[in-house]
Amino acid sequence: MTIQAPYTNWEPVPLISITDFCLRSQDRQEPDWLEEMREDKLCRQSCLDVRDLDEGELNRYNNTKKAYRTEILKEWPQTLIDSLMPYKKAHIINGKQLQDYIECEKYDLA
């Protein structure tokens, strides 16, 4: 999905996912999952890239990443809204849809 507007000089600019927005707004860096998996001996030491993982290792990688991103989405809303909104009683357009998105597990977050 992209956006085109005067502030993008009418050039299409890709939108970031809500998870990436949460990570960026909280100055978080996602861990290096491959490095953590190598340290925990969950994958071969020779794996330097996701493409090097076998099927079982790739499943563990994706599950770990998805669990991390799900936790981010559970904890961010109130903290983020409080920190970014200058007003205590801010109204969020489509707030119900945002809450439904957060609570819904049918979206692939990996």
Image (spheres, rainbow, N blue to C red):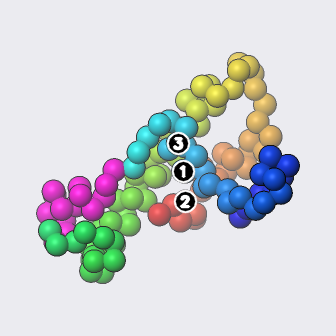
Relative side of 16 to 4, left or right? left
Q: Return the residue found at the far bottom.
A: 55
Q: Which residue is mark 2?
A: 105
- Judging by the rendered image, the residue that carries numbered circle 3 is 24
Q: Amino acid at mark 1?
A: Asp
Residue 2: horizontal and vertical position, in percent? 73, 61
Q: Is residue 93 left or right of residue 28?
A: right
Q: Report helix, strand or loop for mark 3.
A: helix
- Which of the 4 image quarters holds residue 11? bottom right
Nearer-N-terminus badge (3/2): 3
Tell me whether the residue at label 3 lies in contact with that at label 2, contact meaning CB atoms closer than 8 angstroms. Answer: no
> What span is in magenta?
31-44
- In this figure, which residue is indicated by the disc labeled 1? 20
Helix, strand or loop at mark 1: helix
Observer-side mark, 3 or 2, equals 3
Q: Is residue 37 magenta?
A: yes
Q: Position of residue 5 (x, y in %)?
A: 84, 52
